[in-house]
Amino acid sequence: MIRGRMGLTAETVSRAAGSQEAPLPRLSGRVLLLARVAWLAVAVLVLGVFVAGEFLYMEGLRTTVCEEDAQTCLRYGLLTPANAQELEDLGLSVGFYAAFDAAINGVFVAVWLAVGAMVFWRRSDDWVALLVALFLVTYGPMSFGPVAPGFLAEEYPALWWPISGLQFLGQACLAFFFCLFPSGRFVPRWSRWLALAYLVALAPGQFFPGSPLDWIGRFELPWAVAIAPFWTGFLVAQVYRYRRVSGPVERQQTRWVVFGVAAALGGSAGLTAFSVGLGLLPEDTSITLYLFVFWAVAYALMLLIPLSIGFAVLRSRLFDVDVLINRALVYGLLTASLASIYLGGVVLLQILLRALTGGTSQLAVVASTLAIAALFNPLRRRIQNLIDRRFYRQKYDAAKTLEAFSEKLRAETDLDELNAELLSVVRETMRPAHVSLWLREPKAGEPETAG
């Protein structure tokens, strides 16, 4: 057993952790004061626009019946004559529906504003965090979700320009967020020109809709098709930053944001596909199923976006999102596998019993339940190993290497052999560019080894 102390020095660990960029200077003095005043002004303006628009929208719901097709009415939360009759049959008033809709919109906007305010309160001297806070208070409430700002602009045309400006500011913050997060630098450098090109492309349609400058409307391009090249570039830039530039903390921040956005958009897409598959959309006009359930769940899923962004910005020591993703994969596959085994076992045993006895029996259900209980832990371990090997190969290999080294350490007595083995383990698990080993010289009278 070695008693002497050993130390490791790694001259660079860029391959293991990625090259961490130097932090940007903090805002201070007049610049910080002006930035804070500007953010507060924008936040108050957004809140005022939403509140005024929401009151106007609620009044329209109480007094206006939508004469358009059912799909258009449901998309904007408006009531058709059939919807009004359905509410009456359920014993509910139009006013109750308007209040319910306002509550959903209010919670949605409040979460975006609250997360943005928290980021502003905690990190307003960091201009990247300030950009994130501005993105949260403009994009969500003004460009994504409630339709109240649009109703206010239609009723009061003088407010159209300020509202359009806030919506465009939200789009600008979104573009620069994807190009600058999390380090605050444009990586790669061409991403700054991509963000500017995106804003130049959007500006005519935002401020001059229907004019010759509005190239998207003039060519009748679908919105998704028009912006697809830009968003492809943003995603490429983020992948490049993640793989080549980001350090471990920045990668963890990126994983949290990706997890929140993917869960929100994926969940909403799955909800829509499920509704279409059941025939609920777009033909069904059920105000109960669509507005009281579909919209509430869809809005709840979208709140994962601001929550994940706020968590990524505010936490200095981030929880490992890989653990959450890993558990979701493992238990998702485990649930699907056990359900398939259970249903298949019940069906097959019922067929077998029918062939043997000429009737059905509860024995099939009992036997399948016992089989599921017996298979749970072995199947979970197998799926866990499969996920680790397939998606977390580096961590899986590192764990196996350390486990093997621990076993060898108990029996190894040769110091040179142990030194070489230790260096090999460090190279395999941490993958530094260079590693060296030194041993502290024993003090006078101190033995180097002890049996």
Image: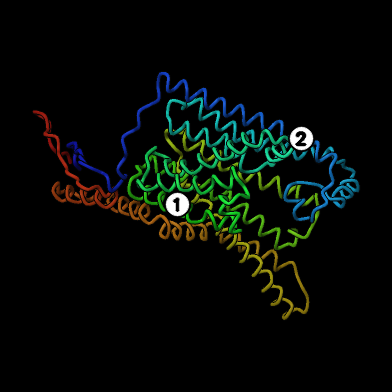
Q: Which quarter of the picture shows residue 317? A: top left
Residue position for label 1:
235
Name the colouring of the figure: rainbow
Residue 129, percent from left and from top: 46, 32
Residue type at numbered disc 2:
Leu
Between 123 and 191, the residue placed more toward the observer is 191
Residue depicted at 50% across the width and 36% down the height? 311
Residue 312, percent from left and from top: 47, 38
Residue type at numbered disc 1:
Leu
User: Count of labels shown?
Assistant: 2
- For numbered disc 1, what is the local secondary structure? helix
Residue depicted at 43% across the width and 30% down the height? 127
- For numbered disc 2, what is the local secondary structure? helix
Label 2 close to label 1 by CB (< 8 Å) = no
The earlier-in-sequence mark between 2 and 1 is: 2
Q: Which quarter of the picture shows residue 59? A: top right
Between 132 and 439, the residue placed more toward the observer is 132
Badge number at residue 122: none
Q: Horizontally, is 77 left or right of 225 in the view? A: right
Between 77 and 350, the residue placed more toward the observer is 77
Q: For the view shown, which residue lies furthest in the front direction?
A: 212
Q: Quadrant of the N terminus?
A: top left
- Callout 2 environment at 10 Å: few (<14), some (14 to 19), or many (20+)? some
Residue depth check, mark 2 versus mark 1: number of the one nearer the observer: 2
Between 287 and 386, the residue placed more toward the observer is 287
- Callout 1 environment at 10 Å: few (<14), some (14 to 19), or many (20+)? few
Residue position for label 2:
56
